Image (cartoon, rainbow, N blue to C red):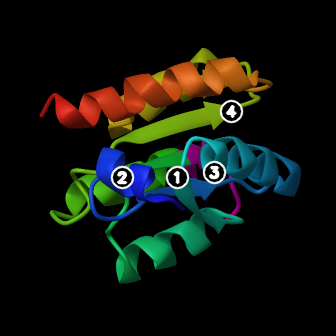
Amino acid sequence: MDNNDTLTNGAEKRRMLVADDDPAILRLIATILEKENYSVVMARDGREAYKILQSDPNFTAAILDVVMPHISGPELVRYMKSEERLQRIPVMMMTAEQDPKLSSDSFTAGACVFLPKPFTTAQLQIMLQMLIGTKTAE
């Protein structure tokens, strides 16, 4: 990391929590985010993401799969919105499921943006801009 990164992004690198039970999707998103200068913390399911959030609330944003073992994406978002120290973290939900109820459940739970799978790098980057934009608007 060179000095320009520190100057443009504040003192510390932006951190992103990514939770998905598909290892290929996790790697893909992590690769894209790292190119965007994010530090990525990965969780393989909702329970792992929950444990990470309990011990570390310092994330710029979170990207969560809707359908995961143990704790679903919307359940995780509801938990985040009920915890004062996690409420400020904007959440992007994603799913390969075609059920429109899943996206409405995600927004009802408190997600800011919704990304259908499969997605392109450009689509993820656009949603990321929207997601991070929601944080600065508060």
The x, y position of residue 23, in whole percent, is 84, 57
Q: Residue at x 22, y 53 (%)?
A: 87
Check the picture and name the quadrant holding the N terminus.
bottom right
Q: Is residue 45 above or below residue 131?
A: below
| Tag 3: amino acid | Glu
Residue position for label 1: 38
Q: Could you say whether the residue bearing mark 4 is in a helix, strand or loop?
A: strand
Q: Which one is nearer the viewer's eye here, 85 or 15? A: 15
- Residue farthest along the right direction in this orientation: 24
Q: Earlier in the sequence, mark 2 or mark 3?
A: 3
Label 1, secondary structure: give it.
strand
Which tag, 4 or 2, sits closer to the chain's start?
2
Instruction: Give the residue type that dot 2 points to.
Output: Thr
Q: Is residue 25 left or right of residue 92?
A: right
Q: Is residue 7 magenta?
A: no
Q: What span is in magenta?
A: 64-73
| Tag nearer the camera, 2 or 3 | 3
The residue under label 4 is: 95
Q: Position of residue 115 (x, y in %)?
A: 60, 25
- The 10 Å Cα crowd at callout 1, few under 14, some 14 to 19, many 20 or more, is some
Q: For the residues marked 3 and 4, what is the alpha-carbon distance in whole angstroms?
A: 21 Å
